[in-house]
Image (cartoon, rainbow, N blue to C red):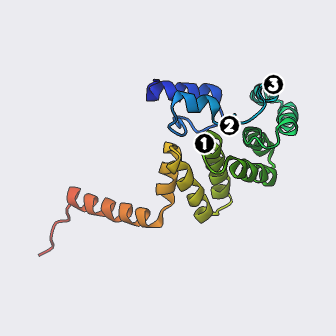
């Protein structure tokens, strides 16, 4: 079984677009291998994974058009597999197509049933896009769902967006500051 540090390193290598230090859902090694892959024809799945890998490589090289082409090709072969939608959403976001990215993230979340690694990543991505659009309540909902799937980054974001937690943190900070720097009484 891999350590948390090992999982973080592997996550950074295989999913360079995810937030640093976020290892995603806590799955055992058998689940990690089959998260999005259950029930698909092995030959088509191999072809789709190769296209997605080419898409990731193209995106890393800055060729977003080629990346989009590869991800769209993967979607044409297995349109019911959520991973390519999630990956294409990242490329669309990098291109500035927020609406297209959100549509693909919605599709990835729907196809995944809201569970597994792809759902977790898609929820985090959608939460970040919603937060940028100042839709904090919707973003918090996505972060809470992703946190329930094991994303530490999403948990931190959900806490930061919780108005009650923010109020409590502000009050606690004031109390601690008063204890550290008591005012001298003017009597």
The answer to whether marks 2 and 1 mark residues whose Cβ atoms lie closer than 8 Å is yes
Q: Which mark is residue 173?
A: none
Query: Residue 52: x percent and y percent?
Result: 77, 30
Find residue 93 and report its horizontal and vertical position in percent: 76, 45
* Residue 90 on image: x %, y %: 73, 41
- Say if 98 sits above or below 164 in the image: above
Residue labelled with disc 3 = 43
- First-in-chain label (1 vs 3): 3
Residue at the image position 78 percent from the left and 43 percent from the top:
80
Residue pointed to by mark 2: 36
Marks 2 and 1 sit apart, C-alpha to C-alpha, by: 8 Å
Q: Position of residue 177 (x, y in %)?
A: 27, 58
Count residues near mark 2 (Cα–Cα under 10 Å), then give few for <14, some for 14-19, many for 20+: many
In terms of depth relative to the viewer, which is nearer, 164 or 187?
Answer: 164
Quadrant of the image containing the C terminus: bottom left
Residue behind mark 1:
116
Place residue 170 in its image quadrant. bottom left
Say which element carries label 2: loop
Q: How many marks?
A: 3
Residue pictured at 50% horizontal, 43% vertical:
150
């Amino acid at each position: 079984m891999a350590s948390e540090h090992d999982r973080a390193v592997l996550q950074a290598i295989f999913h360079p677009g995810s937030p640093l230090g976020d290892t995603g859902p806590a799955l055992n090694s058998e689940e990690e291998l089959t998260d999005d892959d259950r029930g698909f024809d092995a030959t088509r799945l191999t072809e789709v994974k190769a296209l997605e890998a080419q898409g990731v490589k193209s995106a890393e090289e800055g060729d977003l058009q080629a990346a989009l082409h590869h991800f769209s090709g993967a979607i044409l072969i297995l349109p019911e597999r959520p991973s390519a939608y999630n990956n294409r959403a990242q490329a669309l976001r990098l291109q500035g197509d927020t609406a297209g990215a959100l549509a693909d993230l919605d599709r990835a979340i729907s196809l995944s049933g809201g569970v597994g690694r792809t759902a977790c990543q898609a929820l985090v991505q959608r939460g970040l896009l919603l937060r940028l659009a100042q839709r904090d309540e919707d973003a918090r909902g996505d972060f809470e769902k992703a946190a329930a799937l094991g994303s530490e980054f999403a948990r931190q974001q959900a806490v930061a967006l919780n108005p009650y937690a923010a109020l409590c943190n502000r009050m606690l900070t004031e109390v601690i500051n008063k204890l550290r720097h008591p005012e001298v009484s003017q009597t």
